[in-house]
Amino acid sequence: MARQPYDGVVVATPVTVPYRRYSTNTAHWWVGRAVREVVQKAGLKSTDIDGLSLSSFTVGPDTAIGLTQHLGLSPRWLDHVPLGGASGVVALRRAARAVQCGDAEFVVCVAGDTNQVDSFRRMLSTFSRFAQDAVYPYGSGGPNASFALITRNYMKHYGATREDFGKICVAQRDNALTFPHALMKKKLTLDEYLGARAISDPIHLFDCVMPCAGAEAFLVCRDDVARSLGLKAARLLATIERHNAFPQDPIQYRGGWALDVDEFYAMAGVAADDVDFVQTYDDYPVICMMQIEDLGFCGKGEGPDFVRSHTLTTDGTFPHNTSGGQLSVGQAGAAGGFLGLVEAVRQLTGEPLGTPVPEAKVGLVSGFGMITYDRGLASGAALLAGGHA
Amino acid sequence: MTKPLTRPKRKDPLKKTRVPLLPQGVRSRTALGLTAAAAEGRFQLQVCADCAAVVYPPRDACPRCLSPRLPFKDVDNRGTLLAETTIRTSTDVYFRERMPWRIGTVVLDAGPSVVAHLHGDLREGQRTQLQLKLDKSGQAIAIALPAEDTPNMQDDPQWRELTCDPKFRRVLITDGRTAVGQALAEALSEAGASIVFVGVADPWKPFPGEDKLKKLERVEIVALDLTDTISVNECAGEFAPRVDILINTAEHVRTGGIIERKGLTVAREELEVRYFGLTRLAQAFGPVLRARGADGVNSAAAFVNLLSVYALANWPANGAFSATEAACLSAAQSLRAELRPGGVKVVNVFFGPLETEWYQAVPPPKVAPSALARATVRALQQGVEDVFVGDIAEDIRARLAVSPKALERELGS
């Protein structure tokens, strides 16, 4: 059966609660602030919210249900999306169907995490059963070590160099310099990138995101409803989602996007060439390169050449991670999976907080997450367009 | 190529002894199957009983056919190192003080990819053999070794964290009057121990083998009577801070079951030498061993129990003896948990009847003391926790694995 289009579904009120390196507040506080801001921006009352989707690593022992009582919401549609970097896309595509089918009118999708001085270490050691049994006891290098192995293998096979990865990181930092919420506020040069200390070879300091506290949120509703509220919104053209793709690959060099990319563009009725900017999940630049390949901007293994032949800043030939991405803004846990999506909505509705992408009409947002053993399992992507239908 | 270890310098007595830390030792119940294999030095992974898929990390459903039947089986341990990284920053305190630390992705010929510790002589792209070992937490980890042996490979720092290699370590053998004690002294001297203290009760009384024992290099006779608490405490007071490996060689072999022996005299003697002897050693030496688990090249490493294999299943012809050995085994299990915070291994060496006077009437196959000594040294070098030495011990282990009840009837007939 052909997939039904997302006709009439829009995303509005992009919200970022400014990040902090460490926070003494709980995840509930961060989530609560984000939801409040969505409600206020949309001109709603919290009793109008009849759908809630939550993503958080640090809200335990609660899940989404505990948050309904905590925040005083009585939704008729509730979702919990524990998918890390894929949370934003997955939350959106589920919420879109709920809104489209009338199961809910206003779905707030929110991701928020706190970061206390010891919470990152504690999360790593118990991240998954496979991590506990088969990763953490091996040097406890966390995702740095896991992605170092993936990066090393990719470099060896496809000839990517540290300079290529550096170009991605440096361009994102340039983008971040105009984005008010970025934790990294200083320009990064390629020399600084190359000269940074090694963390887990070939991963060096500026390949790594900085764990922090923060929250991101957006509202999913029908186009006509958004218009009646006077909300600027972005239309949802297509989404894909895939988990544990290519389990036979001995080491990860591609993600689930590669399985579904044709259907993705077909559903949207656009081609990769039509995309005006791309927000990839940038928890390590090698993953950005894989997404550029697997989402059809170039062939497998051509990522390094693609990066070399483009400028990746917001005003460049391939505007990429226009707010600076997690590499420059910080990784607020599951909110890292919302960062690109929230930024995309801002760009498409003409309300970027930093530099606007010139004439941005179509944006692509990609998500990737949950390295429970040796590879990221969750992947997803969404195509969004500006303007009402 | 591995840099050979150098003999550690005499320790500065004013220097703080490094507190032993452990890598994370939490595992799922299923993953403990790897620990069981590592304890015996086997390489086992789950193999699906329905579709034969080799599965890693440990699971409770086959990722190929969803079968719940996933027993651990011996598997080909060869593979290729696809990618490696040198970790320089860790969130874990144990690894932080051991940085840099190399790990890599090994794809096994048998199928799965395994993230493993790397031996220093292994390089990316090379063929490798994977082994399961027990880390300082006592749980299984995988380490990838060069496909062929390399010079001084046993001195590699990441490998040495996993073993109790006697090289440059100081050993106490608790009873040098026994043939096994003497064979061990020789074997450990050859294995490069810095010094081998050999305990002898009433050292002024001569004993067979004494001259040869005293001529061994780096062997020192010390007064130690395991049946005397004061003697054990005095020995510990003098030598415990310099004992990295303790090997209890005390033996007390007498025939007969429970009923045939009149009174408790022999039973008490047995317990005095074996169970209470072990208890005295543990109480006197255990705390120091546990505190010195991370004390450099010659850190405290192992408490070794030589146990009759009849500790595992009573042999009624030597029924009272077997019961005492079982008591020692049970105590050893407790010791394992008690010494684990120091990263000190409790090694149980199970052996069948020995080629010694006390087993005179027992038919072969029997184990020569030198063979038992060699197996013990190998266990230390390999970091194995449970060792079965000789045909009888292997046989009992195998039969026990199939049917403990059948074995009980067979041993009693």
Image (tube, rainbow, N blue to C red):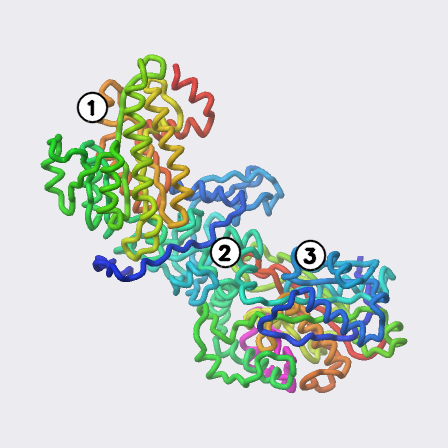
Quarter of the view holding residue B362: top left
Q: Secondary structure at mark 3?
A: loop
Query: Where does residue B190 sit, x and y in percent of width and height?
Result: 19, 45
**Are dots 3 and 1 on a single chain?**
no
Residue A280 drawn at (x, y percent): 63, 72
Circle 3 crowding by C-alpha within 10 Å: few under 14, some 14–19, many from 20: few
Amino acid found under the numbered disc labelled 2:
Val
Q: Amino acid at mark 3?
A: Asp
Look at the image and tell me in which quarter the C terminus of chain A lies.
Answer: bottom right
Q: Quick check: A47 above or below A42? A: above
Label 2 crowd bin: few (<14), some (14–19), many (20+), radius 10 Å: many
* Magenta segment: A298-326
Say the numbered circle drawn on residue A62: 3
When asked about the image quadrant of residue A23, the answer is: bottom right
For badge 1, the amino acid type reads Glu
Q: Which mark is residue A135?
A: 2
User: Measured from the top left, where is residue A129 in percent x and y?
Assistant: 56, 51
Q: Are marks 2 and 1 in contact (CB under 8 Å)?
A: no
* Residue B389 in the image: above or below residue B145: above
Mark 3 chain = A
Q: Are marks 3 and 2 in contact (CB under 8 Å)?
A: no
Q: Earlier in the sequence, mark 3 or mark 2?
A: 3
The residue shown at (53%, 55%) is A131
